[in-house]
Amino acid sequence: MQHKPRKKICDVYGPNAVSVRVAQIWFKRFQSGNFDIKDARRSGRPVTDKIDVIFKKVEQDRHISSYDVAGELGIDHKTLLAHLKKYEYTTKLDIWVPYELTERNLMNRVLILYYDVMKPNHF
């Protein structure tokens, strides 16, 4: 027997919109008068408290290993990488850099190119 509310949701949004178990949990929650759609807080320290510390470490040492940061802060390595990716950081030649260049980074790049072109060749 299929759960009727689930069937109605799946008829509108498609066959994989919601599982039977999730529909049962929602139904039970709504039946008890709780109409809050956010999940309840879970135990443990939230990683979001450590986001500033993650970026501080990366800014202080652009060569720091993601494994070292995760180990120092007690964060799962994949979680750390997800946060760095979310805030648009990547590694290039083992250096953490933002995906987008800041205006200062862009000007430095232009100056470096200018000096490379303008300096005399010493052969």
Image (cartoon, grey):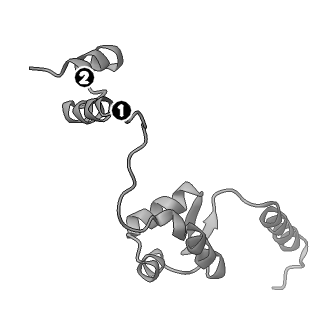
Q: Residue at x 46, y 78 (%)?
A: 73
* Residue farthest to the front, as pictured: 33
Quadrant of the rendered image containing residue 57: bottom right
Decide which of 37, 119 is in the foreground and name it: 37
* Up-down relation of residue 58 to residue 18 (above or below): below
User: Which callout, 2 or 1, points at the residue further toward the start of the chain?
Assistant: 2
Q: Is residue 8 left or right of residue 79?
A: left
Q: Position of residue 97 (x, y in %)?
A: 63, 67
Which residue is identified by label 2? Answer: 6
Q: Residue at x 55, y 72 (%)?
A: 54
Q: Is residue 116 left or right of residue 79?
A: right
Q: Quadrant of the C terminus?
A: bottom right
* Up-down relation of residue 78 to residue 115 (above or below): above
Label 2 vs label 1, nearer the camera: 1
Q: Secondary structure at mark 2?
A: helix
- Say what amino acid the circle numbered 1 marks: Gly
* Residue farthest to the left, as pictured: 1
Which residue is identified by label 1? Answer: 33
